[in-house]
Amino acid sequence: MDFPSFDGENPQFWKTRCEKYFDVYGVVPELWVRVATLNFTGNAARWLQLHEMQSALFTWESLCTALCAKFGREQYQAHLRQFNTLRQSGSVGEYMTKFEELMHHILAHNPAFD
């Protein structure tokens, strides 16, 4: 099983997958941040590089909180806008797939969304 990479998309889902990986492979918590940040790509890697240049040290929880603050809010708002304007233009199956995809993203950020 490969370690989940992170490019800035869906930070809460990524966090959950990382913690499952750490559990399955017995990674000690002291190494979680180092192991996880080795697998940052794209926007997330650039964001991390900036923080490392500023000597920002992270615990696992502070890293995840910072990632959700940076990448989660904007994505949550974008997914809400897409959800609110979702209309069926193709098959029912295509509509349901898009609906379920958007609900997954929205609920990852706000489990109380109703």
Image (cartoon, rainbow, N blue to C red):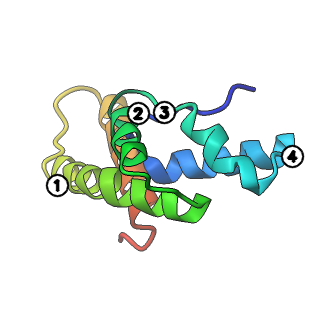
Dot 1 and dot 3 residues touching (CB under 8 Å): no
Task: Quickly name the residue at label 4.
Answer: 26
Q: Secondary structure at mark 1?
A: helix
Up the image or down, 39 lies above or below 101; here it is above
Of marks 1 and 2, which one's residue comes earlier in the chain? Answer: 2
Up the image or down, 57 lies above or below 18; here it is below
In the foreground, 73 or 33: 33
- Going by the numbered disc 2, the residue's amino acid type is Ala
Q: Secondary structure at mark 4?
A: loop
- Residue 6's x, y, as percent? 48, 36
Dot 1 and dot 2 residues touching (CB under 8 Å): no
Instruction: Characterize the local packing of mark 1: few (<14), some (14-19) or many (20 or more) Cα atoms within 10 angstroms.
Output: few
Q: Which mark is residue 92?
A: none
Task: Quickly name the residue at label 3.
Answer: 40
Of marks 4 and 3, which one's residue comes earlier in the chain? Answer: 4
Q: Secondary structure at mark 3?
A: loop
Dot 2 and dot 3 residues touching (CB under 8 Å): yes
Of marks 1 and 3, which one's residue comes earlier in the chain? Answer: 3
Task: Quickly name the residue at label 1.
Answer: 84
Of marks 4 and 1, which one's residue comes earlier in the chain? Answer: 4
